Amino acid sequence: MLFCAHVLKTKLSMYNRMTSITLHGAVEEIGGNKILIEDGSTKVFFDFGLSFGKYGSFFSPYLQPRRYSIISDYINLGLLPDLTGLYRQDYEKRFRETSSDPKYDGVILSHPHLDHAGFLSYVRPDIPAYCSSGCKAILEVFEESSYGFHQYTRIKESFIVRESKRDASKKVKDRTSTIPRDVNIFKNSFKVGDVTVHPFPVDHSVPGANSFVIETSEGSIVYTGDIRFHGRRANFSQAFVEKAASFEPELLISEGTNIHEPKTYGEMDLQQDLFSIVENIRGLIIVNFPVRDTDRMRSFIEAAKKTDRSLVVNMRQAFTLKTLAEYDVAQMPGLEEVKIFVPRKGWGVLDDMNYPIEIQMQDYQSWENQFIEHENRVTADDINANPDKYIFRCDFAELKYLFDIKPPEESIYIRSVTEPVDEEMELDQKKVDNWLKYFGLYPYTQLHCSGHASGYDIQEMTKKINPKKIMPIHTERPTEFSNFHGDVILRALGEKYHLS
């Protein structure tokens, strides 16, 4: 009996030490990454992102989630996994009993794109988050300057009632209670419970992107996050691949956004083509590129220098550059390299001497005020007076400012974002086309390169890392990985996979 009990105890101990991976997002879809790795008693999420596809299947700007039951609604719709001890208590207690202690040891973010980090807002603040300095900088910019529910580094408690300051006998909603989240910036390897995590900076279309090697009790796991090999930091991605191979990993969890694409058009190819497009333009050059893609911004800065122009960015992009500089993130454009567009907003009294500066500033959000009198600021009047001196970055929401800028003949529009991939994007693009036609900027030039590795590069990466098994994620075509690897692990959403 004692022998049997010992054997049973040993088997239970071995089972408890088993390493498992559960995909709670990004299964047969692009984005929404939520990867749970368990090793013994340690439970760690790698990324906790929003699935844009699933979200768009249910919600729109005119149909928004119910705030008081947002987590339960998201769970019911499959946007969040139904797990206890994970979500912030002020929301969870609205629909079920909450755990007094967290049941997860951390959330590790590969980069700050919302399909990887957007749902961190709903995670308990006493579950530590881990990210690069560039990632944290971008998340802080989101919190301060973007619309929507962005609470990554600090939690604003909801459903709190306090006494009224004017009348102690009355109760009011408390909107001031804030809890800081434990956000740890990594530079080197670190441990979370029994798991050792080795982060490696990689090339992607946003600052602060990382891939990881995760050492567990049953071997190493490699997670790519989002990665490419054709941007300005291709050497980062190549160095990661070499390091990852040295761990002789049991499993590679690889993104496959462009698994079906041949070798990809690169950022330096784009910059060279951009030079040839803009060098003979005599009017205003109007462009659109992703708001947080600082590598694409660099391409347009270089094009501006080559044509004796200045790149004009919006205040949110300027705020991003300022915050990245405060976090000492390397190889970022500096504010001194761009002009900052300050449009007329609200009452439209910018620079109107009939209104004092404090009244003018009331047209802007608090984070924008630092740019109202910035030495590098420009207005619509400045651009209108000298259109051949600027490359003006203008996204969908800023097209209305062209009424003040009045682009002259021979002006052009360069669209440097991805082509529409769904019905909603196609509808938006039709609206953009209507604006461009109105201002004589249609047809436009399309010039873009992807933030994701091509199928060729994923295959080469896999060969060099040489994992025993591969688990596709962040792709609509997971079975295509079987074309170049003999042991591809496919799991349904929420289905646990044991490493051995």
Image (cartoon, rainbow, N blue to C red):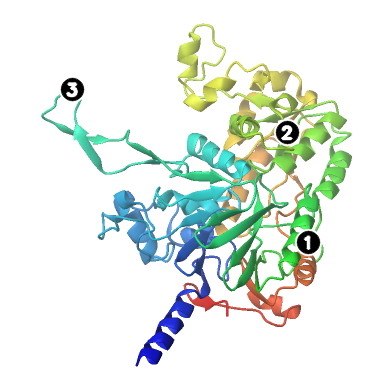
Badge 2 is on which residue?
333
Q: Is residue 54 left or right of residue 391?
A: left
Q: Residue at x 70, y 29 (%)?
A: 312
**Foreground of the two, 372 or 191:** 191
Q: Is residue 473 above or below residue 107?
A: below
Badge 3 is on which residue?
166
Q: Residue furthest front?
A: 2
Q: Residue at x 60, y 58 (%)?
A: 197
Which is more foreground, mark 1 or mark 2? 1
Q: What count of labels does the image hold?
A: 3
Q: Is residue 360 above or below residue 165?
A: above
Between marks 2 and 3, how big is the CA–CA gap?
49 Å
**Amino acid type at image mark 3:** Arg
**Amino acid type at image mark 2:** Pro
Between marks 1 and 3, how big is the CA–CA gap?
64 Å
Secondary structure category for the residue under label 3: loop
Q: Which mark is residue 427?
A: none
Which is more foreground, mark 1 or mark 3? 1
Badge 1 is on which residue?
242
**Amino acid type at image mark 1:** Glu
Q: How crowded is the residue under tag 1: few (<14 C-alpha within 10 Å), some, or many (20+)?
A: few
Q: Residue furthest left?
A: 169
Q: Are marks 2 and 3 in contact (CB under 8 Å)?
A: no
Residue 397 pos. (x, y %):
57, 38
Residue 264 pos. (x, y %):
80, 59
Instruction: First in sequence, mark 1 or 2: give its number.
Output: 1
Quarter of the picture holding the C terminus: bottom right
Instruction: First in sequence, mark 1 or 3: give its number.
Output: 3
Quarter of the picture holding the N terminus: bottom left
Instruction: First in sequence, mark 2 or 3: give its number.
Output: 3
